[in-house]
Amino acid sequence: MITRTRRESVVFGHPFHLKVVDRTLPPGEYEVVTDEELIEELSFPVYRRVATMILVPGRSPHSSSIEMVTVDPRDLQAARERDAAIPSGVTGSEGRPADTSANGDQQSGRAGARRR
């Protein structure tokens, strides 16, 4: 079988989770590696994905090690979509706005304004 490897950089703006990793991963740039194999029975070149891996920081906070973890591409896509859906003013994994007024509304210049 003829195989090829594609590499892609993915950026997460917020802490995120993947099902295959038992900890919260920090925001940042991650390398995603996809292995594909050529389906040779066809008259034109078609590749089938056989594995998707992501390089994540090692467990030790004082280590510069990197782990390559096999990940379900659907789980990775879901994590990317969740990250993109978080407003830019939100920090941390709690999903709370970084700046809120006393009544829990985001600051918009009309804090505490009510409809009549």
Image (cartoon, helix red, strand yellow):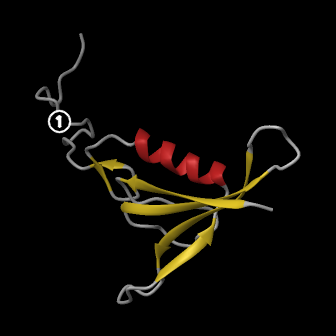
Identity, as a three-letter code, of the amino acid under mark 1: Gln
| Rendered position, 64 above or below 17 | below
Residue drawn at point x = 75 percent, y = 60 percent = 2
Residue 29 place in picture, x, y as percent: 37, 61
Q: Which residue, given by chain and number where applicable, does mark 1 sit on?
A: 107
| Rendered position, 107 above or below 29 | above
Residue drawn at point x = 18 percent, y = 29 percent = 112
Residue 26 place in picture, x, y as percent: 39, 66
Residue 53 found in image quarter: bottom right
Q: Residue furthest right?
A: 41
As rendered, which of 108 and 113 lies closer to the eye? 108
As rendered, which of 32 and 5 lies closer to the eye? 5
Q: Is 38 displayed left or right of 70 in the figure?
A: right
Q: Residue furthest front?
A: 43
Q: Is 48 displayed left or right of 111 in the figure?
A: right
Residue drawn at point x = 25 percent, y = 44 percent = 89
